[in-house]
Image (cartoon, helix red, strand yellow):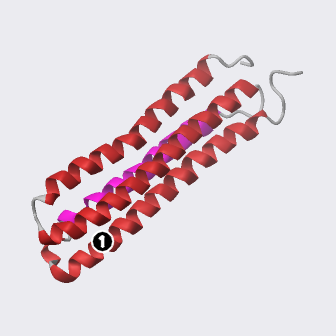
Amino acid sequence: MSLCPPYAPFFGFAGVASSMVLSTIGAAYGTAKAGIGIAGLGTFKPELIMKSLIPVVMSGIIAVYGLVVSVLIAGGLTPRNYSLFAGFVHLGAGLACGLTGLSAGYAIGIVGDSCVRAYVHESKVFVSMVLILIFAEVLGLYGLIVALIMNSTATSLDVCT
């Protein structure tokens, strides 16, 4: 059995796709869910809309994490001399970033929607909303860090180069 089978890049490309697609789905959900809350807030207090865009911006950052990991994995893909080990590591890196981005986007969307609606009635909610959103965002950041470590491992330990 060859260490560099011709189907090995499939797993690397699956990592690219899972990182980008899953983190983008999380970001889209977070943006949509928080946007619904902002639309509800805008009917009562339009002056608070700009301050309430924080969950939408944080959701967009989740998609950037997935984009960064996808570009790095795609940069390490070569048509020849690509080992099965590198393919599996790249798949794991893409899944790590994508799934944490998906969960972070969901968390940001739900917290953003609820807190923005509560912000209409009580302005003290704003600081706690930002803190909770930071903790939700950090989930995606952890996935990015793990994916970067895995990607560097795949390039340093590749047996075919």
Q: Which quadrant would the C terminus be assigned to in this image? A: top right
Residue drawn where x is 62% and y is 24% of the image: 154
- Looking at this view, is 132 or 50 the one in front? 132
In this view, which residue lies farthest toward the right? 1
Residue 123 appears in view = yes
Q: Residue 156, relative to residue 47: is it above or below? A: above
Residue 114 image-quadrant placement: bottom left
Q: Disc 1 marks which residue? A: 37
48 on left or right of 2: left
Question: Residue 115, located in which quarter of the rendered image?
Answer: bottom left
Q: Give x and y (percent) for residue 155.
A: 61, 23
Q: Is residue 130 left or right of residue 159?
A: left
Q: Is residue 75 visible?
A: no
> Which portion, as a residue range, is magenta?
51-76
Residue 117: quadrant of the picture: bottom left
Q: Height in image: 26 above or below 86?
A: below
